Image (cartoon, grey):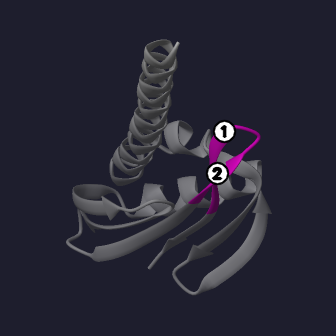
């Protein structure tokens, strides 16, 4: 009986570890997917991650927007400032990066992710 309990305990631990690793991989995958879409100007791809209300800060303008409004604002920005090169880094819920435009201008971006109803969503995005 003791051996069965130890085996069950070890198997439970391994199962929990695998669940944690799977969640970590998916979360990191979301960061990579979002950041790549941002620096490639693919608004449709990363706007899918917007929460229903997202705080947007573009250059000197800041507002709380609906998902559709935020997408429109960023489409306008990226039409005017097309990224050509990029660098980004992330941590548990905050990502920042840099990109250079065709005109040679450099911009920094930040976004914050939250897990809302078991989905990773952007609640804050800024570029300056």
Q: How many labels does the image show?
A: 2
- Tell which of 29 and 36 is nearer to you: 29
Nearest to the eye among marks 1 and 2: give it. Answer: 1
For the record, the magenta segment spans 113-123
Seen at 77% across and 40% down, the residue is 117
* 104 in relation to 74, above or below: below
Seen at 34% across and 57% down, the residue is 82
Are the residues flagged by discs 1 and 2 in contact, CB closer than 8 Å?
Answer: no
Seen at 39% across and 36% down, the residue is 25
Question: Horizontal and vertical percent for residue 68?
Answer: 75, 48
The outermost residue toward the front is 1
Q: Is residue 116 magenta?
A: yes
Task: Please identify the quarter of the rendering in which residue 42 is found.
Answer: top left
Q: SS at mark 2?
A: helix
- Tell which of 128 and 17 is nearer to you: 17
Task: Left or right? Give the position of 23 relative to 29.
Answer: right
* 72 in relation to 104, above or below: above
Which residue is disc 1 drawn over? 119
Task: Left or right? Give the position of 64 relative to 3.
Answer: right
């Amino acid at each position: 009986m003791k051996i069965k309990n130890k085996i069950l305990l070890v198997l439970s631990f391994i199962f929990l570890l695998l669940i944690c690793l799977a969640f970590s991989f998916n979360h990191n995958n979301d960061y990579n997917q979002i950041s790549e879409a941002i620096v490639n100007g693919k608004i449709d791809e990363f706007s899918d991650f917007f929460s229903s209300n997202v705080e947007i800060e573009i250059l000197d303008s800041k507002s709380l927007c609906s998902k559709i409004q935020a997408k429109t604002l960023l489409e306008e920005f990226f039409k005017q400032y097309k990224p050509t090169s990029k660098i980004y880094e992330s941590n548990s819920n905050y990502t920042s990066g840099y990109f250079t435009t065709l005109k040679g201008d450099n911009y920094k971006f930040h976004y914050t992710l939250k897990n809302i109803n078991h989905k990773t969503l952007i609640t804050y995005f800024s570029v300056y």
